[in-house]
Image (cartoon, grey):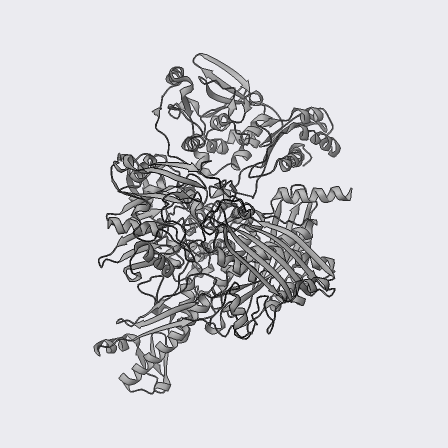
Amino acid sequence: MEAEVRPLPKMDYVAPSSLKEAFNLLKKYKEKARLLAGGTDLIPKMKKGMVRAEVLIDLNRIHRLSGIKQRKDGLHIGGLTRLAEIRESPLVKEKAPALVQAISLMASPPIRNRATLAGNLCTASPAADTAPPLLVLDASVKLQSGQRERIVPLSEFFLGPQRTVRRPDEIVIEVIIPVQEGSSAFLKLGRRKAFTLAVVSAAAFARVRQGKFEEVRLALGAVAPTPLRSRRVEEALRGKEVNEENIARAAELIREEVKPISDVRASEEYRREMSLVFTQRILAKVDGRG
Amino acid sequence: MKKTVVGRFILNGEEVEAQGDPQMTLLRYLRDERRLTGTKNGCSANHCGACMVLVDGLPIKSCLLKLNQVAGKKVETIEGLSKPEELHPIQAAFLATGAVQCGFCTPGMIISVKALLDRLPSPTEEQIREALKENICRCTGYIKIIEAVKLAARWIRRPEEMRSQAVETGLGRSVPDLDGEAKIRGCLTFADDMYMEGMLYGKIIWSRYPHAEILSLDTSLAKKGPGIQAILTADDVPGHNGMGSLNPDQPVLCRNRVRFVGDAIAVVFAETPAAAEMAVKQIKVDYRELPGIFSPQEALRPEAPPLHPGGNICKHLLHEEGNIEAGFQQAAVVVEGHFETPFVEHAYLEPEAGIGLVDENGILTIYAPTQFPFEIRKQLAAVLSLPEERIRVIATPLGGAFGSKLDNTVEALLAIGAYHLRRPVKITLTREESIRLSTKRHAYWMDYRVGLDSAGNLMAVDAKLLSDAGPYTALSPRVIDQACIFACGPYRVPNVRVEGWAVYTNNANGSAFRGFGINQAAVAIESLLDEAARKLSLDPFEIRMINALKIGDRTISGEILKVSVATKATIQAARKALQEELSVIKARETSGKRIGIGVASGFKNVGAGKGKVDDAGAIFILQADGRVVLRASAVDMGQGIRTVLVQVAAEVLGVEESLIDIITGDTALTMRHGGAVGERQTLIAGKAVELAAREFKSKLLQRATAYYELPFEHLRLRGKGIIDLSGGSMIPLTELAKRVNQAGENLEVKYYYTAPKTYALADKDARRTVPPEEYRNYPSYAYTTQVAVVQVDENTGQVQVLQIIAAHDCGRAINPQKIEGQIEGSCAQGMGYALSEAYILNRGIPLTRTFKQLGVPAITDIPHIRCMLIEDPEPAGPFGAKGISEVATVPITPAILNAIYDATGVRIYTLPATPDKVLAGLRSRQAVKV
C-alpha cells in the first residue's frame, strides 16, 4: 500500500476560446482528454494519480459557458458559472434558495471562487452538495456535442461514484431550473459545525395548498452511490395532508432507499439513522407549518 | 522559471506590478517576492486561515489564490493594517486581552476581524463566531479572541478609551506579552520567515511504505537537474545515523529499511524549491514490502516479526503497592471497563521548518522551532561527530508545539545539509509532510478494575495500559512511566497493581503531547469513578472529596506530598461555581436535546522529574547603556514564559519590566537547561531567574555603595535607577553602567539551579533504597477539577459542550491572563480529544492527511469557559508559583464523557465520542427498555 501524493504529471494543455474549437478537440482526443473547469477536484486527483489524462482541455476561456439568466422556462445557469457567483446571485436566492444554502455550507470562499456548477455535478461525488437541492428543484442538464444537444433530468444524470451519463465528447452547457412555485431548503450534518464534510445532506421542495402537499420532492447526499432522489417518500406524501403522522410514516420509507457506506466520517448504520432524522427535519422546513 | 508580468494590483495601498510565474499563488508572492511574511503558510490547502488577506475588503485565504485572480484588485495584508508608530484598535485589543499566544494564526485572524468590523461595527457573539470559523487557532481556545473582537469594536467607536488604557505591569498582573506587538503586526520572525543570502532549499524523499526493505536508491537522473547542489543519503551522515533522546534509533536517513511512512530516505538541496521538488520526482527507490505490525496487540504475539533487534517491547513496567486481592475483598462496589483512545495530532499552526548554516566562526548553527535546544544539540553532536561546542541551536519562535517539537523533526537534515554544503539550507515541511512525520499522542488500550468500600473510599485499582509507541523509541518509555504514576488520578489508593507497556508498531511515532500519558489514564479512572459514585449514590464531587490527595498522603508510587496540594480546594471551587450557574444551565433544556453535567479531577507533574535533571540557569548583565540583559534558560512556544520570567526578574530587582531585555532558547547564549516540557519552566527557570536576580540586585547595590559612598541598607532599585532612601537621591542605571565601564569592570551574575533529585517509577531500586521522606517522582504537582455541561441531540447523537468550569491551583498566579489562556487552550484541546479528534491509519497508511481531517475545534465549537485560580503556594517556586497548562487538558476529556453519560445514560469507552457512537448507545438503551 502506498501513501503518495505526486506532483502533477506531464500532459498536454489546451485552452480553446470557443465551443466549436472545444468540440473539435474532444473529437480528436476522445477518452484521452479531460475537461478542466474549476479544477478544485480534478487537479488534486491528478496529483494523487487517481485520474489520468493525456490532454487537459481548459474550458475557462469559453465565456458563454458561464452566467445566470432567467428565461421563460426557468433559470439557466451556465456550466462554468462559479459557485461563488451563484451564491451571490439575487435571482438564484429568490428562485432556488436551497441551492444558495447548500453552496454557503460548501468548502471555503477561495474554493467557491474557482469551483463550478458543472464541475461539482460531473465529479459525481455521492456527497456533492449542489446535487440534492438541484434534484428537488427538478433541474435538468443540457449536454452538447458538436451540433447535437440533449437535455437530461438531473435525476437521471448520475450513474455511480464518479460516473455520469455524460459521454466523453459532450460538454455540460448549462443547468436548467424550471419555474415553479413552492419553498425549498437544505440541511447538512457534519462532524463539527463548521470546517467539515457532509456525513448526510438533505434537500426538500414542497408546495402546500389547503393544508396538503400538492407537490413534494426530497433528495439526500452521501447516503448512496449517487445523490439520491427519494421517490418513495415523495409518493407517500403527495396529495396527503401536512401533519406529523403522515410525515413520520412517509419518512420511514427512506430507510429502504438509502444505500450508505462506512467511512472515516461515519458508519453505515449511523448514516441510515441520520437519513431518517434529516428527512424529517428537512420536510419540517418546507411543509409550511412554520 | 519563466517570469512574466502577471498583472497589476494594489498591495497595501501601493500599486504593484506582479512579476512571476502566473501559476504562483498570492501567498508565495507575498512571502517570497515581497517578503511580507506576516501572512503565514499553515497548510496551503485553504483549511487553517493563517494566510488570510483582504481582497477588495473581503477576507480571502491567499494560499490557493493565483496571482492573476487578484489583477486589478486591492489586496491588504497584516503589514498594511497600521503604521509603525501606531496600532490598529484590533491589534491593540488582541494584545490587551491576551488573544495572542504563539502568534502564528494571529495575523490571519486579525485580518478576518478587520473584514468583520468593517461590515458589522457591533457584531453579536454569534456573528463573531460565524466570521472567524475558518481561522483555526490551536493555542487560545478562542475565548480571548472573542473578547478581543468585542473590545476592538468598542475601541473603534471610542478611540479615546483605547488611548487612555493603562498597560498592566508587575508580578501578579496581566502584563501583555513581550513579543505580542511583533506577533500582532505579523513581524515576529518564525523559521519559515527567514531568508538567507545564497540559501538552498531542501526537500525530503519519504518512505512510501509503512514497513519495507530498501532494495536500491537511484539518484543519478535527479542529480543532473538544474540547480541541484546535493542529494544526501544515509552514506552522508558523518556520525551516528539516528536521533532520539532516550535511544537514538530513528535514522536521520534510512539506509536499508523503513519502519513508517514518516521515514526519510534522502534529502535534496537545490537552488530553488521547484528544482528540489523536480529532483524528488526523479529519484527512484525500489522497495520490498515487509509484513507490518499495525497494533500493539499484534506486536506482542510471539510470531510477530521484530521491528528492532531487541524485539517489539519498547518498555514494560509493573508497579504493585499494598495487597490488591485484599483490597478487592474489602470492596463493596467494583467497577471495570475497557477503554481505547486514538492517536492524536498536535496540529500546531506552524509546520516544522528551519535553517542550517555554518557561521563565520565555523559553528554549525541550526535555527528551528525546537522545544529543547540543548537536547537537539547533544543529538546533533553524535550525528555529525562534532563536539557540542561546535554546534549552536537557536530556537526560533514556536508557532505552537504542545510536545511535538521536542523530538527531532528537520534539525538533523538541516545539520547534514549545512555540514556538507557550507551554505545556508532551509527546509519547510508542507502540512501533509508535517502530519506524516510528526509525533502523535499515543493510542492506548486500557483495562481497569476499581474497588471501593461502601463509604466511597477507593480500596483497590488494577490497571493495565498498553500504548502504541509506533516505529521508534522517542519518549514512549517516559510517557508510559508517567501514565502509570498517574494511573489512579489525584486520589489515595492503598492497594494498586498498575502494569504498562509501550510497544513498537509501524503506525505513527508516539511521543510527548500535552499531558504526557496522563490524559489517557484519566479517561479510564475518572469514567469509572463516575460510575462508582452513581452506584454508591454519592455526588460526583463528594466521591472525589473523600479520596482526594492531601498533605501527608502518599501517591500510588510512594511519594509523600508535603506542600501545595490543592485537590480539595479545586473540587470545592468547581462545585460552588456549578451551583451558582445551575439554574441558567437547567433553563437551556429543550425538547429533543438532553443536558448533562460531568465532573472530573486531575493532577499532573510540574517539572520533567522521573530521574531527569530539572535544571535552568539565568545570566544577568548590566549593559553599557544601563539596560539589563537577562539570558534565561527557557523556550517560549506561545505560552509566554519570556514575559513571566521578566515579571519575576523585575519583581526581585525592583526595576521596570521594560528595562529588561530577555534572551532565551539559544545554546550559545544561555546556560544548559531542560526543555520546554512538563509545565516546568515557571517553576524551574523562574526559580533560577529569581535567585540570580537576588544576587544581581545585591551586586548592583554593592557597586553603587562603593562608587557613590552610600549606605547599602538604604539603597533600593526603582524604575530605571537606584534610589537612596536616606538622602532621596537617584542614581540612574545608565550612570552606574558608565562608572562600571570606566572602571573596566563588568556587572554580571550567572546562576545555575537544579531541582531536587527525582526517580522514575521504573527505578525499583530507588523505591527500596531512598528514604520515604526523600523519595519523589517530580519537583511539584498541579491540581485541577473541571466541570463540563453538554447538550446531546437525542436524534443525531451530536454533542455540544455548553459550558466548562475549570478550577485550577497554580501556586501563585504571576500573570493571570496567561494562565487563563493556558487553561482555555487546554480545554479546547481536551474537548477535541473527547469529541472529534483522531489520527487514523489503515495498516500503517494515514487516512488523516490534511489539516481539515484532524477534527480540531473551530471557534463555533467552543463553549463559555469559566476559569478559577486557586493560589496554594509552592515554596520551591518563584514567589510560590508552579506550572500550569498541560494539567488543564487532563480532566476535561473525562468530564465531557461523564456529562454525556449524565445526559443520556450512555458511557463512551472509545474516543472520540462521535455522534454515531453516542446515538448507537442511545438506541441500544431504548432497545433494552422495550
Residue B296 in the image: state x and y as whole percent.
54, 48
Residue B417 in the image: state x and y as whole percent.
29, 49
Residue B824 visible in the snapshot: no
Q: Determine whether B153 is above or below B621 in the image.
A: above
Q: Toward the viewer: B484 or B51?
A: B484
Q: Residue furthest front?
A: B303
Q: Toward the viewer: B429 or A104?
A: B429
Residue A274 visible in the snapshot: yes
Residue B682 in the image: state x and y as whole percent.
45, 67
Q: Determine whether B895 is above or below B77 in the image.
A: below
Q: Determine whether B538 is above or below B22 in the image.
A: below
Q: Determine whether B641 is above or below B917 in the image.
A: below
Q: Is residue A232 left or right of residue A29?
A: right
Q: Toward the viewer: B569 or A247?
A: B569
Q: Is residue A179 left or right of residue A255?
A: left
Q: Quadrant of residue B750?
A: bottom left
